[in-house]
Image (tube, rainbow, N blue to C red):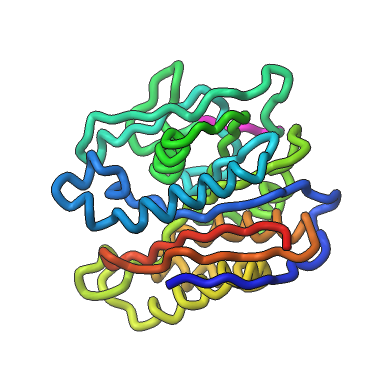
Amino acid sequence: MTGSARGRTGGSRYGERVPLVAAAVCPHPPLIVPELAGAAAAELDELRRAADAAVARLLACAPDGLVLLGTGPATGWIAPPAVGSFRPWGADLSVPLPAGRDDDSPLPARAVPVAGDAPATADAPTLPLSLAVGAWLLARHRVGVPVDAAQVAAAATPAELAALAGQVHQHRPRVALLVLGDGSACHGTKAPGYADPRAGAYDEGVARALADADAEALLGLDPALSARLKVAGRAPWQVLAGAARAAGGDWRGDLTYHDAPYGVGYFVATWEPA
């Protein structure tokens, strides 16, 4: 499913104007990494192509910095260096957070250590899965700009989400966001969360919001229902929505992938100023 539309995010609720120049949304299934999928790697070729195109489109907007954002065990910024490991999913493969940060550009206040999906080392803590996949996606491109990373807990409060949304622009004149998040894991009896009849309508609503660049629709996603439907992307999407709303003006959304090949909703979309 693809589509594009324009939406108005409205005025800022987060103080000063945020110089957000573009955003991309991608899912973070471990099987997007071919080494983890093995003989089934071709089943997600379409998703990989869509994600690669979204990242390329993001970088083509010539940002001064990129923020990688996904779910994790806490809410806050990840102090580099950090490494994504796919060992818990069956491959002795790791990918570092891309280098290129400016020495004179510290992370926003209250950076947090990472308690990821695999044991961390003292020198390079392990990224949570969402950001490991994000780092893997970036590694397929010539990034060329500083990359910061932030994680957001599923139980983060609206105030925490708003605060993180207001920080994405700090220390960068022009910022792009790469947001990692999955939809409902309840599409069918073989899905990780088993079947839930509400999953289809929920993910269709997310798809429309991403296609329409509808920040208000994303901000309106219900945390309790999202948790019951095992949605991993709700909190990161709401940070995206908050950052776009803070930036203000008209935004154009383009949804280039929407499917649930393994019973989990996956979306690829880009948002750019209209």
Quarter of the image with the C terminus in it: bottom right
Where are the magenta residues, as a range? Answer: 109-113
> Which quadrant: the N terminus?
bottom left
* Residue 202 appears anywhere in the view: yes
Along the viewing direction, whichever of 5 and 221 lies nearer the viewer: 5
Left or right of 11 in this view: 190 = left
Where is residue 243, by image quadrant?
A: bottom right
Q: Residue at x 43, y 46 (%)?
A: 130
As drawn, is 192 to the left or to the right of 234?
A: left
Q: Residue 76's quadrant in the figure? A: top right
Q: Report the magenta stretch's main SS.
A: loop
Q: Name which residue lies at 44% across and 51% down.
A: 51
Residue 235: x and y in percent read 55, 57
- 17 displayed left or right of 264: right
Residue 111 within the segment the image draws in magenta: yes
The location of residue 19, given as percent across then percent down, is 77, 46
In-front residue for pair 63/170: 63
Up-down relation of residue 133 to residue 237 (above or below): above
Q: Is residue 19 left or right of residue 133?
A: right
Q: Is residue 219 visible?
A: no
The residue under the point 62% across, 30% down is 145
Position above or below: 207 against 76 = below
Q: Is residue 214 one of those drawn in magenta?
A: no
Q: How many marks?
A: 0
Hey, which quadrant is residue 108 in on the image? top right
Farthest residue to the right: give it.
Answer: 16
Residue 200: image location, x then y, percent: 39, 79
Please report the residue visible at 63 percent of the width from the left and 72 percent of the height from the top.
5
